Image (cartoon, rainbow, N blue to C red):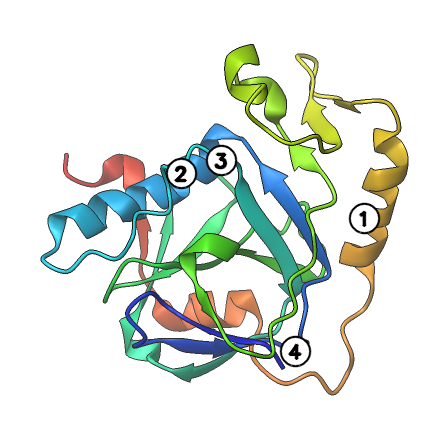
Amino acid sequence: MASATCQCGKVVIQFTSNKPRVSTECCCDSCFNRVGFLADRRRRGSSSPEDTSNSGKPIVNMKWDNRVTIVRGREQLFAYKLTPETKVFNIATKCCHSFLFGRNATYDAHCLTTNEADLVWGDQYQRIQPSSRWFVNQWTDARRATLEPLMGIWVDSEGNLDGEKGWEAVFENHLAAMNAPILKDAVGETFDEILQSLGRIDIVSELDK
């Protein structure tokens, strides 16, 4: 099974498979803000791993079974969300402020989400190529021009899904993978179980007021 550590190695997590169900790129402000918050905390600390939030490239998000084993370092975990209203919850590390995983129950189906760049992956991890690039419409033409071609999908001004020609088939494959059931004997805890065990959830918009 694939395993990963935080940037400093104090936290080790293990997934139920060697590769994610789905891999996508994301250009949305929210994804950059949730890792940007952690990068800011890293800069305030004395030991700062590489800043993965400002690479100028889309963030690679990977969807895994909503079961994960905390092998080591549970005491280092903390939970946060960007605003009181958002439905996206995140879990990161106190030791080096690495993003571990996040989840939005509205659209993540049987999955939780990791950010490829924020973790150090073990030998059994099998990378899969991103199948789509989300919310590229939030980037300027000049910034988009720096990217390699990849199917773009976004939400239009009326809140409807849209994208480049052929996006529907890519999206259907994405949904099918995310909605596939988790094996009954899968080990580990769900995202919500880990979240509840942590108790407190920091609200980023209310910090440092």
User: Label 1 near label 3: C-beta < 8 Å?
Assistant: no
Residue 91, x across and y down, in percent: 41, 60
Q: Which residue lies under the disc numbered 3? A: 57
Element type where label 1 sits in the image: helix
Q: Can you identify the residue that label 1 sits on?
A: 175
| Residue 57 coordinates in the image, percent (x, y) | 49, 35
State how far apart marks 2 and 4 are (Cα).
29 Å
Q: Is residue 169 left or right of residue 35?
A: right
- Tell me whether circle 2 and circle 1 mark residues in contact (CB < 8 Å): no
Residue 16's label in the rendered image is 4
- How far, Cα to Cα, is label 3 from label 2? 5 Å
Q: Residue at x 85, y 53 (%)?
A: 176
Which residue is depicted at the point 60% across and 72% down?
A: 125
| Disc 3 and disc 2 in contact, CB within 8 angstroms | yes
Q: Which mark is residue 55?
A: 2
Between the C-alphas of marks 1 and 4, the distance is 19 Å
Q: Which amino acid is tagged 3?
A: Lys
Query: Which of pointers 2 and 1 indicates the residue nearer the eye?
Result: 2
**Mark 2 vs mark 1: which is more N-terminal?**
2
